[in-house]
Image (cartoon, coloured by chain):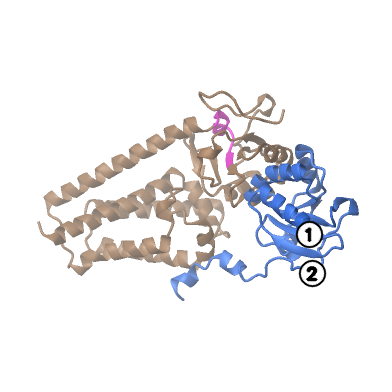
Chain colours: A brown, B blue
Amino acid sequence: MSWGVMLVGFVNVAMGYIFMRSAWEKCRNPLNFALYLQRFLYRLPLSGLRILVYAIISLESVLFLSFAIDLWNGFKTIAACSVLVVFTAFLIANRETIHQSGCSCFGDRSRLNRYPIARNLTLMGLCLLPWAIGFQSLDEVMTRVQIGIVAVLALLLYRGYTRQDKRMKTEYPQASHELPTLVLSYRASDFEEADRLLADTAGYPLQVLLDAPEWILAMKQRKWRSHIVVYDVRGDRRSGQTYLLASHGKGKLRKFSEWSSYTNSYLGGEFSGHGTFDNSSHSGAAYPGERDSIRSES
Amino acid sequence: MDFKTLFKNERQAQQGKSAALLPGETFPMSWHSDFYERNVLFAGVFSLYCSHCIDLLPELVEAIRNHRIPFALITNGSVPENMEIAEHFKTAFPIASIEENEIYDLYKVIETPYFYKVHASGEVLKGFKIESGDDLASHWKEHIRLEVNG
């Protein structure tokens, strides 16, 4: 087996994994990515952006498959580089916004999102390596080995997502499954933005899990009186980044990094039919399996 | 255009702003003479969106109470919010409400919390930052020492 063949195999596995993960992350929460795109393509309605998201997912899925099973040598390289060039141009054109907020190509997993331009340029370089050695295609045995490796990676990814979903069920109060829940810390850089959004009297209540000292919590319970504000007992264990939890589609709890866009749309009634909640019996959030140590305004 | 320019940090742009009111300048706010002690008062400029301010406030209040420091708090909170602060901490010092933009426009504070030592005449004596309530107590004790020594 020549080093060239191994290189091609490595590039196929790496690129296949990257596109698989990117497509899968968007698939798990397409609305979040649509809300992310809305920052830049604000003239398009959300319904149009959702179509765009599914088109991107489809494109990434095709690229994943073509790298994973070593199809269309040459063509897949051109296609992948073209896609990366378009995405990179988009990132450069919107660098101010992206620098402040990061990109959302890989969902809310921040490591791959951190330096998106450098990441894409690296991927382009990786993709072009087989060109440099003259398109060495793989024999049947190597192709099977490659498919096996990608299958194992897919299984590991699936296991990771399943664990994440299980953890979400127990990590947050039961009410999070019924009402969009904003997870917020007074230490967050966007605390001010959240304060302004929540201060407006709204017809659609949110649950707010607030990590803050008692006096700030009491102050915000009064100020954000349209919403259910409870103390986040696990606040000190979280990253400090603001996000929103909501059940959509298949009823699974999903994390929205685009919490501001979601909240704006939700408070504007765009997701009407969601968020009906009997506030009369609510006395505070109860975490599954934990004593209720939440303070709430009675 | 190089990559550094592509990702120029907003903070770098902020560093171009001039910081703090200078000694001798007139402080934008004044209080009744009863709030001054030994002809001075310490004014703290706080933001209720600033975690350092929120973390510092409880121990600051304790230090002010223990050492009887003449103090006034200026925040970007609304009047009802400031009243809640006063009620929660049982403060005896005045708490004033200002607009968000006034933190820099009037008080020249880039990063909260920030403190000014203000003479009863309204003149700024100095501006400084602190990390704890004890730091403010040290400034107060230093003032007393300077006064005693003439």
Q: Which mark is residue A211?
A: none
Task: State the residue position of label 1.
Answer: B149
Residue A172 lies in the magenta-colored region = no
**Residue A159 screen position, x and y as percent:** 34, 37
**Label 2 or label 1, whichever comes before in sequence order:** 2
Q: Amino acid under label 1?
A: Asn
**The residue stretch that appears in magenta:** A173-183
**Residue at label 2?**
B24
Give the percent coordinates (x, y) of residue B123.
Answer: 82, 65
**Eyeballing the image, is A143 above or below A169?**
below
Give the residue furthest to the bottom. B1
Chain designation of label 1: B
Location of residue A204 with respect to B140 vertically, above or below: above
Identify which amino acid the numbered label 2 is placed on. Gly
Tell me the element at label 1: helix
Picture quadrant of residue A295: top right
Q: Position of residue A214 (x, y in %)?
A: 67, 36
Name the foreground residue: B137 vs A102: B137
